[in-house]
Amino acid sequence: MSNQNSDTGLSTPQFALLTALAVITLVLAGFNVMAQSANAGERQKFAERQQYIAQTAKLRKVGAELIKTTAQVAVQTQDKQLTEMLSKFGFTIKSNNTEAGAAE
């Protein structure tokens, strides 16, 4: 029995080595596909967090303007319920009596 395969011209150890390398290559390719998939998922999560942060910054500006306008209306109309609602959420309204007296 010879140590050479008649179909391929490779010896048995060479054939075994090439087969092992092919299997290792397939396993590594599989790991690469899984890693790319996981990376894509993490990139998606990162993009969603960035979008959330950007939207939060915009909403913070809108919220501040809304609170300011609501406080101005509460002072101008002397609306007790509106003032109480704002104070429930931690906002204190300080009215400038000198401006209010001059306006009347």
Image (spheres, grey):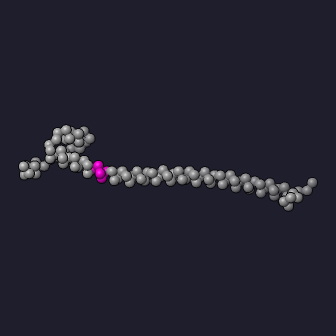
* Place of residue 82 in the rendered image (x, y in percent of width and height, measured from the top left): 20, 41
Q: Is residue 40 left or right of residue 32?
A: left
Please give the name of the residue rendered at 38% of the width and 54% of the height, measured from the top-left corner. 54
Can residue 40 be seen here?
A: yes
On the rendered structure, is 70 left or right of 55? left
In this picture, is 101 found above or below 81? Answer: below
Q: Quadrant of the N terminus?
A: bottom right
The residue at the point 30 percent across, 53 percent down is 61
Main SS class of the magenta portion in the image? helix
Q: Which residue appears at 26% of the width and 49% of the height?
A: 66
> Which contiguous range is marked in magenta?
60-64
Seen at 33% across and 50% down, the residue is 59
Toward the right, the furthest residue is 1
Indicate whether residue 11 is drawn in magenta. no
In x, y percent, where is residue 16? 80, 54
- The location of residue 51, given as percent across then percent down, is 42, 53
Please state which of residues 57 and 73 is positioned toward the viewer in this rendering: 73
Q: Is residue 98 visible?
A: no
In the figure, is residue 93 to the left or right of 20? left
